[in-house]
Structures are given as C-alpha cells and as structure tokens.
Image: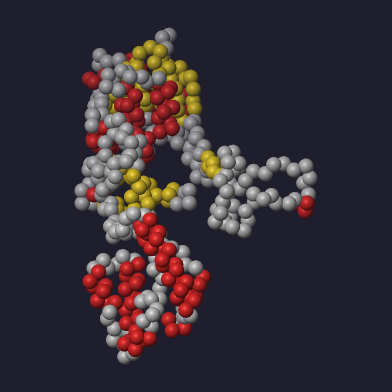
Amino acid sequence: MTRKFAKACVTCLERHNVVRNKQFLCALRNFGTGPNDSDRDDSSSDAPASTIPQFSRRASLFGRRRPLSPLERVSQLLPEDRLSQEVWALRDTRNTEEEQDSQSLGKEPEETTEEPQGSFAPHHVCVPGERPIRFGETLLAEFSRKRRLEFRKMFQLKEGLKLHSNWGLIAHKDMEGRPAGSIIRTSMGNPIVIRRPSLDEFTLFMKRGPAIAYPKDASAMLTMMDVTEGDCVLESGSGSGAMSLFLSRAVGHKGSVLSVEIREDHHRCSVLNYQRWRSSWSLRRGEEWPDNVQFHHGDLISARPLLEGRGFNSVALDMVNPHLALPAVVPHLHPGSVCAVYQANITQVIDLMEGLRCSALPLVCERIVEVQYRDWLVGPSLKKDGTFNKRKAPREDDDDDKYEPSEGDTKGDLNFQDPVAFGAVPYIARPHPEQTGHTAFLVKLRKILK
C-alpha cells in the first residue's frame, strides 16, 4: 500500500467518523510500502498533504458537508503532479476562508457523539395527568411514507423485547422514559412514531375472537341509549369487550355495567382486554380506570339471580337471536328507556321485527339505521417536481398562445421556491380509495306502558 493511498484512506475515515483514535490515524497517514514514496513526497512537498478537499469546520459542527465546486470535482480526478499552481492557490484561499469561519463561531470543533435512543431532552410540554412511557403500557407504532400509512402495530412495552417490522428494529428499552408521540429511528434509519392508542384504536387492534362493535357503531348506540354518568346498563353478548369498554367510560365511577356472555372463550377474551386497558391506563395517568363492569359467564336465564331486584336505564344486545332474550330483559328495563340491538345483516333485523310482532312485549321500534363513514383525502396540489401549484387569476383571453408567464413563475430553478402566501395554493379533495364497508344495523327499541 502506497503512502498516497494510505492518506486517502485516512481522509475517508476522518470524514465518516469511523475511527476516532488520533494516534492510529497519524500512524496510518505516515505508513507506506511503495518503492517511490520518498521521492514522491520530496517532489510534492509544496503541495497539500491530501488531494481530497477538507470540509469546513462550520459544516462539521452542524452535520453538513460543504458542496464541492466544479473545479474541485475535476481536480480530484487528476494526479497531484498535473495540477497547476493556480489550482493550489485557489485551494489555499478556500481553506483560509473556512478557518476564518470556524474561528468566528468562537468554539473549536468537538467530536460529535450520537445520543443514545433511550435518552431525550425534556423540551416537550407536559400535559397534566400524562406520564412518560413506562414498561407494561400498551403503545401504538406508526410509520408513514409519502403521506401514506405503511405500518401500524399495537404492542405491550416489555423489558428485553424489540419491535420488529419490515422497516427495522427498535428495542423496547429505547422507548421507556420518552414522552408519548416521540419519533424514534429504527435500525434501518426509518422514523417511527410511538404514541399511546385511544380507546377506539385499542378496540380495533386488540386481540379478539368474535367481531367487535366498531367505534362508529358503538358511538351511535351510546347516543341511542342516551347513556350518562351514573347509569346502570345491561349488556347481553360481551364479545371481545369493545362495547363493555365504551359503556364503562360512559357510566363513570358512579355507574355500573353488567355484561353477560354465554361462550367461555368470548368471556375470557373480553375480561383480558378489559383488564389490559385498565392496567395500561393506570400506568399512563397514575389513576385507576373505573372498575364498574361485572362480567358473567352464562345466559340470561342463569343470570336471573343477578337481575332480580335491579333496574336498568338502558340495554345493549349483541347476539344472534335477540328476540329470544327480550322477554327476560324487558321486565328489568325502566319505562321509557331504550334497548339498542346490534345486528349484522338485514335478515336478523327481519327476524327481530317478526319476533316483536308475535310477542306481547311493550316495545316499539323507533329507528333502524346503518352508520356509514366516508374517509376523504385532502392535500395541496403539487407539480411533478414536488413544488406547489399556484392559483392563477382568470384571464379575459383564454388563448394559450397569447399567454405570457409572469415573473413569479420559477420553472428553471427547482431548488428555489418563493414563499407561498396563505390561500395561494389550490387543494385537491377526493374520497379515500379504501373505505370501510358495512358493519351492522342498529335497531332502536323503546319500552312503553300499554
């Protein structure tokens, strides 16, 4: 290895901060095995030691590299003995200006060390009641690219584990102690947002066996039943525990919810999801989630001892044949209260209406609705080069041949963009290509006194 090649290697190592041992770099710089190294060094003693231009100290402080001029790029391809004195003089002038810029900063450049991912600067605004992320919490990881969500996963933070994805790995210990909503780089350098899920997101991504009551349907059912704090609600069909969580939040500490499930696996799943949310909430806020849901494994007939002597402000039914359970529920429902029924298809709705017609129950069907949400995409209009389109005033003459571009149009320089004033950028709005399909029909029944 020649001395010239060793100097080039040292320059590359210093540029990328691969080796920080200065003694090793100095020894490597003076190392050489070529036969003509001594003669070559004597002949080029007036020239700089390295042919690759040095980066400025200002650029090293801020993590940026100085752009090379065309002359410097061409001079890198030529050997040192072919360069003229004018080129060396121009390089010396450029290096002198860089030293003056670094001295004007008032500080000598220091070796930059990467901050470990587990530590962060407490510059965020603390929300009252919110705590930093702790082990045992349920978190949500999201990765977006080009305004499109590519990755989303809900997981429980545990010590010693890692978050795996196609965009890299993140150790769980690097998330602990950070505020919610932090951006953490994966092992592949991709930014992933780590935040706490809301209740509707938790119900969508939690472990479940049967189909859940989707948040849009659950909110409509809560509006139908007019659930307020302190109410006593009966739920028939716990499922995966989604509706139980929404009812628990609605009734608060003063209310209570009785959830009945006939299948053992569904009962177990709903209880686990409810306890998981309560434990994550206590770690997040430092206060207990109201323990106001009583889960019962069995049917309404076996739950008759729990129903005796109790009255309910509203009832939520999520089962296949609700007309068979209504005779056991209606006697415990207050007059004028609402019973909301969650049905998957219109055939089940027809069977429910036929069962009400054939029975003598004091119930009146008020509404049968299907809740539909439509997601939209709204964003600024962009050109092919990524710059914003601008609104143009209407012209009296629509002839394109007579149109002359204004001085504000910048077609040639793509890197230069004038600051766009408020309201000067047009927006494009269209429905989202991925829409949520049909989920359920909601039937509103009200108890009356005949």
Residue 273 image position (x, y, % from top left)? 28, 37
Q: Quadrant of the N terminus?
A: bottom left
Residue 79 visible in rendering: yes
Residue furthest bottom in the image: 35
Which quadrant of the view contains residue 310? top left
Residue 109 image position (x, y, % from top left)? 31, 59
153 lies left or right of 279: right
35, above or below 215, in the image: below
Residue furthest left in the image: 159
Q: Residue at x 36, y 81 (%)?
A: 45
Q: Quadrant of the C terminus?
A: top left
384, above or below 45, in the image: above
How was the colour assigned to the protein in this rendering?
secondary structure
Which quadrant of the view contains residue 92? bottom left
Q: Residue at x 32, y 41 (%)?
A: 123
Q: Residue at x 78, y 42 (%)?
A: 396
**204 vs 306, nearest the viewer:** 204
Which quadrant of the view contains residue 221? top left
Residue 355 visible in rendering: no
